[in-house]
Amino acid sequence: MDPHPNTVAARAEAPEVAWARQLLAGDASAFTPFVESFQAKIFQYTWLMCGQREDAEEVAQETLMRVFESFDQLRDPAQVKAWVFRIAKNYCLMKRRKSVFAPTRELSLDELHPNHDGDGQTLQVADAAERPDAAMLRGELGERLERALRALPESYRSVVLLRDVEELSTAETASILEITEDNVKQRLHRGRLALRKELAGYLEAVQ
Amino acid sequence: MNPRQAPDPECQDIFARLSEYLDGELSPEEAAHFEAHIAACPPCVEFVESLKKSIDAAHRFHSPCAPEHVPAEVAERLKKAWAASLARRGPEK
C-alpha cells in the first residue's frame, strides 16, 4: 500500500510554480496558462463555497487583478498557489459578508462510522451485461462528489477544497484559513469521512 | 471496522486517525503499528481502500461549470497590471 499519496515532498514542481517564475522574469508566454489555470481554480473554489456563478466569476477576476497588481511582491514562486488562494479567500469572504470557515455544524466521528445502513447508496448491478458504462459512472461520481462537497458544513468544505481538491499542504491551508494545523487535520479527516460515506456505493462501482 | 459489531480499539484508532496515516503525518512507529494492524484486519483494509478512492476522486475533481477562457478585455487589463507591477520592481539584479 502506498500510504502517502498527498505529501508535499512527493510532488514534483507544479506547473503554476514554473509559470510564476517565468512571469517574475518577465516571460509573457506563461501569462495565459497562469491566468486560465487560476481562473478555473478560483472559480471552482468560490462556486462551491458561495453557490453563485456570478459571485464566482467576480471573485476569480478580482483575485487575478489583485494578484497581478502585486505580482512584484511574490517572494517565493513555490508559494504562489497558497498566495493566490489567500487573496481569493478574502474576496470570497467579502462576497459572502460572513466567514467561510465559521462552523455551522460539527461532524462527529460517531455519525461518520461505516455501517451498512448508512454507507451511501450502493449500486445494485445484477450482472456484467447490465453494468453501466465506466465513463458514465465516473460522470455520475463527479456529480455526486460536487453535491457531497456542497452538503459539507462550510468549515469542513473549505478545508477539503484546499487540501484534497487543490492539494495544498496542511500548513498552507492553515495559513489561508487562519486556523491551526490541528484544526485543519481534524476538519479534513471528518470531511473526508463524510464524502466517503456519501460516495461509498459509487466508489465500489467505479474502478 | 464496524464499531457497532466489533468495537476493537485498534480499529477505532485507525478510523479516527486514518487521514494522518495517509498524509504521512504519523511517526514511523505509529505508521508501522497501523500497517501491522491493517495487514491482519480485512474490514480495515476495505475501509482504507474506500477512503483512498474517495480522496482520489477529490484530487481529480473539476467542476464542469468552470470557465475555460478569460474574456479578452479582462486578460488585457490583467496583463497591464502585471507589466506595471514588474515595472515598479525595476530590473532584476
Image (cartoon, rainbow, N blue to C red):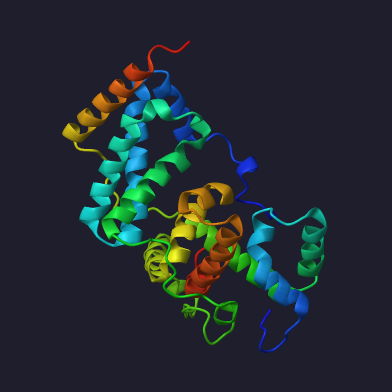
Q: Is residue A115 above or below residue A105?
A: below
Instruction: Name the residue at 41% across, 59% down.
Output: A135
Question: Which is nearer the eye, B20 or A132?
Answer: B20
Residue A2 appears at what percent x and percent y? Answer: 69, 53
Instruction: Name the residue at 53% across, 47% down.
Output: A172
Q: Is residue B22 above or below residue A34?
A: below
Q: Does the image show residue B63?
A: no
Answer with the quarter of the image where residue A150 lies.
Answer: bottom left
Question: Which is nearer the eye, A86 or B15?
Answer: A86
B72 to the left or right of A80: left
Residue B43 appears at what percent x and percent y? Answer: 70, 76
Give the mark count: 0
B47 to the left or right of A120: right
A197 to the left or right of A158: right
Question: Which is nearer the eye, A197 or A174?
Answer: A174
A181 to the left or right of A55: right
Residue A21 appears at what percent x and percent y? Answer: 46, 25
Q: Does the image show residue A187?
A: yes
Answer with the quarter of the image where residue B91 lies.
Answer: top left
Instruction: Name the residue at 76% across, 79% down.
Output: B9
Residue A147 appears at what percent x and percent y? Answer: 37, 68
Instruction: Name the residue at 24% across, 49% down.
Output: A57
Q: Is residue A13 above or below residue A113?
A: above
Q: Is residue A172 above or below residue A27?
A: below
**Quarter containing the N terminus of chain A:** bottom right
Answer with the quarter of the image where residue B61 lies.
Answer: bottom left
